[in-house]
Image (cartoon, rainbow, N blue to C red):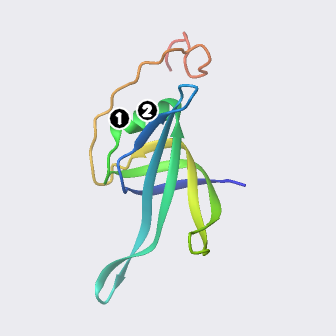
Amino acid sequence: MSAGITLTGRLVADPELRFGANGNAVLNLRVVTSGRRKTDEGWVDVDTTFWSVSAFRQLAENAAESLSKGDLVIVTGKAKSRDWEDKEGNKRTSWEVAADHIGVDLVRTTTKTNQVARSSTADDAWVSDAAPF
């Protein structure tokens, strides 16, 4: 079972883009999330979690071109856990997200965007010949 999730975190590595046998783009990201708590010694990270994120098709290509290691990102999608055993026989759990949306978090950065030309708008409900609002 998967659950909807929104992550805000940093990329721990550059995005990895590849293409499947059918030609569709697949992107893999590693995102680290954590909270901050003030202690007597100063600020410390708490609840640190590493997430594997996958994106597909145009989202994958756009994210690969736009993002790099260290970027602060916002990811929405479906999360699921995967249980596995390491080489020593210890039970482990990893968290994976299938991304619906990926964006740069603008809280500490600025960016310029470029509109991507669409190859087809025939099945796009947002495209219409009607006059704008």
Q: Which residue ends up furthest to the bottom in the rendered image?
A: 40
| Residue at 31% from the left image edge and 90% from the top image edge | 40
Of all residues, the one furthest to the front in this rendering is 87
For residue 3, the mark is none
Q: Where does the image place residue 61, in percent across and percent down from the top left?
A: 43, 32
Label 2 sits on residue: 61
Residue ID at (33%, 27%): 114
Q: Which residue type carries mark 2?
A: Glu
| Residue at position x 41%, y 33% in the image | 62
User: Which residue, given by chain and number where applicable, does mark 1 sit on?
Assistant: 65
Q: Residues within 10 Å of mark 1 (few under 14, many from 20)?
A: few
* Position of residue 122 in the picture relative to residue 70 (left or right): right
Q: Position of residue 108 (x, y in %)?
A: 28, 54
Label 1 SS: helix
Inter-mark Cα distance, 2 to 1: 6 Å
Q: Against 34, is 40 above or below?
A: below
- Quadrant in the rendering for residue 43: bottom left
- Depth check: give the residue in front, 92 or 53: 92
- Tell me where residue 100 appears, x and y as whole percent: 55, 41
Which quarter shows the N terminus? bottom right
Q: Amino acid at mark 1?
A: Glu
Q: Eyeballing the image, is 79 above or below 100?
A: below
Residue 23 position, x and y percent, is 53, 25
Give the side of residue 86 with respect to residue 31, left or right.
right
